[in-house]
Image: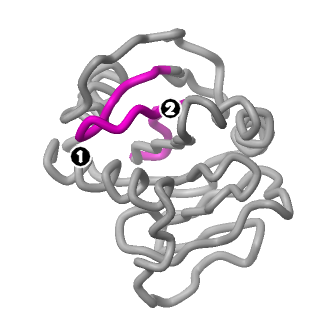
Amino acid sequence: MAAVRRTLVRIAIVATLGAASLGCPHEDQFDGAVYHNGRLSFRAGPIPSTWQRLKMDGPLLAFHDTTSNGSVDVYAKCGEDRLDTSLLALRTQLLIGFTETNFREEKVVPFDDREALRTVIDAKLDGVPMSLDIYVYKKNGCVYDLVYVARPQRFDSGVQSFESFVAGFSALGG
């Protein structure tokens, strides 16, 4: 599982560094507000006009933020094997492979009638500096990771849009 999460975060990083064309075609299950995939469904928060949808393997939803040249990704995995894992352990798996980590903030916050672990961090992946804003939470038998990543010098220009997206996010089924 850790290797899968590391691969997913690396995909987000590649998109952040300008390789948005790596997208892979698949059936679109997002109508601009609600994502559906079998029993898994969620409502996304507001999506600014500066976010371009990416179609790629890994995240259920992925966007390139043209303001920050960053990436916004939503991952979800349902199943009993993750429900007993702490939010901290799930977040730790996301950061495997990162070095020179500097945690700016990490706290449990109310989120979608549950608790989420929010982490804001500066780190390097393969020597490339980046900043991340991560929300990890569990609801309806699923684990959700909402991730914003951008280069440190551009991170602040996209964080407000990401926070609005997160504030409007809600799990509908799982």
State which quadrant residue 14 falls in.
Answer: bottom left
Sooner in the amino-acid sequence: mark 2 or mark 1 = 1
Q: Quick check: is 130 in the magenta stretch? A: yes
Q: Quick check: is 85 in the magenta stretch? A: no
Between 3 and 159, the one nearer to me in the picture:
159
State which quadrant residue 62 falls in.
Answer: bottom right
Residue depicted at 45% across the width and 36% down the height: 138
Residue depicted at 40% across the width and 51% down the height: 13
The spot of residue 102 in percent (x, y) is 40, 12
Q: Label 2 sits on what residue type?
A: Leu
Between 104 and 94, the one nearer to me in the picture:
104
Label 1's element?
Answer: helix
Applied colour scheme: one colour
Q: Is residue 1 left or right of residue 104?
A: left
Label 2's element?
Answer: strand
Mark 2 → mark 1, Cα distance in angstroms:
14 Å
Q: Is residue 170 above or below residue 18?
A: above
Residue depicted at 85% across the width and 64% down the height: 49
Q: Is residue 124 left or right of residue 2?
A: right
Disc 1: which residue: 6
Residue depicted at 40% across the width and 84% down the height: 24
Disc 2: which residue: 132
Q: Where does the magenta region start and end?
A: 121-141
Category of crowding for the residue at label 1, using alpha-carbon neighbours closer than 10 angstroms: few (below 14), some (14–19), many (at least 20): some
The spot of residue 149 in percent (x, y) is 52, 41
The spot of residue 25 in percent (x, y) is 45, 90
